Image (tube, rainbow, N blue to C red):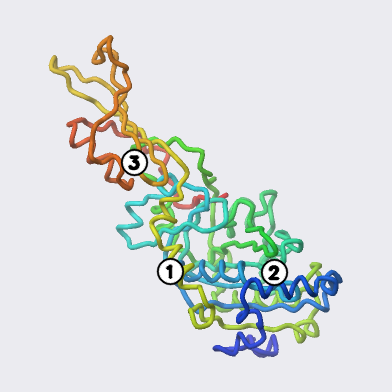
Amino acid sequence: MSLISKCGRIVIGRSALCCLQKFGQTKSQARWTSGLNEKHRRKDSNDSIRKSVFISQSTDVFTNLALEDWLYRNFDFTNHHVLLLWRNDPCVVIGRHQNPWLECNVRDTEKHGIALVRRNSGGGTVYHDNGNLNLSFFTPKERYNRRYNLDIITRALYREWGLKAAVNEREDIVVEGRYKVSFDVSGTAAKLGRPNAYHHCTLLVAANKTLLSLILQRHEADILQTNATTSTRSPIKNLTEVYPDIRMDNLVNAIGWEYLRTKSLALEDGGYDHIQNQKGFQLINPSEDWFPGIDKLKDEFRSWEWTYGRTPKFTVTRALDVPAQNGNLYRLNLSLEIQNGIVEEIRMSLPAGLASADFNQDANVITNLRGMRYDCDVMDNIIAAIGCKTIPASISENAKKTNMVATQ
């Protein structure tokens, strides 16, 4: 059944914004209006809140994250809740407080032309492609309800295909017991602020699991020490592996339909009559014309300073073999201290047999690489300059992880 026949309306093009009067207002104007009507808005009811399903027409991750952030910053959700549905071309999305070099194979992302981006919310790292459906649930902060959102997804799967999915103790959506088909893109599954909040998650439909496994594995020999948030790996499965007839357009229809028919403040089915009072499905063009200021947000998400420069301080250490004049090999550690993505210190831990009594075993390495942006090649360049040999790290832990994904 089509979106139109199920929901009564679908708005395409610029007219999708005709009912959103706040788009033309500044943030201060919107908040002033909100404060003026606060007494009237305290009386929440399912009947006074309308819902929309926004469907982004972009598959660019920087654009979609900018759209999500724009709505979070500028939109008034007091009487208008929104579900944003969006898909991305292949990319890796890390949490706000994560280290990209710890979470994924940065070299392979560059090799395969896969975008790497840091989002605004916390939590673990995820892989996106056109086989994933991303969902962002927007409400005022006081109405944030993660379980309500996840239950809408599971109810949609059951209503449309009879597929039984459950929400586990970690509040992940799982099928067949342990296989996770949905994983949250935020550790807290939310961005909470004043006055708005959102919870977002990614639903695996027909994702490229081979590429996912390759990109989310690190192959470097370096040991990283950091306080950055680290991802937890979980077994995954695509929905199409469980129910081959599921297609993306049908899934968008089913979840959007379930969202619109469910009452706003309780997990209750309002049926067709309830849907007739909602704002329906709206195709969104995330452009500067529609969302003034979105290009600036997009540029911030694309910037090196945001993706890499916001990485919490970390130390990279690699074990090396150094040949001595007597023919013996000495083991030492080469360490780089990285702050805001910049190489601040380069130190070498000398073996006791090579350090004299007058010198500390930890020696600073003099090099013009200090002060440069860190990347995967910096350590290799230093090792090549001092003529040492890298000791290979064990890669046994990386075996047979095709069905694993980093998440939190």
Nearest to the eye among marks 3 and 2: give it.
3
Q: Say left or right for 408 vs 271.
A: left
Q: Earlier in the sequence, mark 3 or mark 1?
A: 1
Q: Residues within 10 Å of mark 2 (few under 14, many from 20)?
A: few
Q: CA distance from mark 3 to mark 1?
A: 32 Å
The answer to whether the residues at label 3 and label 1 have Cβ atoms under 8 Å apart is no
Q: SS class of the residue under badge 3?
A: strand
Whole-percent x and y of residue 350?
28, 20
Q: SS class of the residue under badge 2?
A: helix
For the residue pair 167 and 62, the one nearer the viewer reads as 62
Q: Earlier in the sequence, mark 2 or mark 1?
A: 1
Residue at mark 2: 158
At x 72%, y 62%, the residue is 141
Nearest to the eye among marks 2 and 1: give it.
1
In the displayed orientation, state which residue is furthest to the top: 357
**Amino acid type at mark 1:** Asp
Q: Residue 314's mark? A: none
At x 61%, y 80%, the residue is 23
Nearest to the eye among marks 3 and 1: give it.
3
Q: Residue 343's mark? A: 3
Q: Say left or right for 57 vs 265.
A: left
Q: Residue 89's mark? A: 1
Q: CA distance from mark 3 to mark 2?
A: 52 Å
At x 60%, y 51%, the residue is 187
Quarter holding residue 291? bottom right
The answer to whether the residues at label 2 and label 1 have Cβ atoms under 8 Å apart is no
Image vertical order of residue 201 relative to residue 398, above or below: below
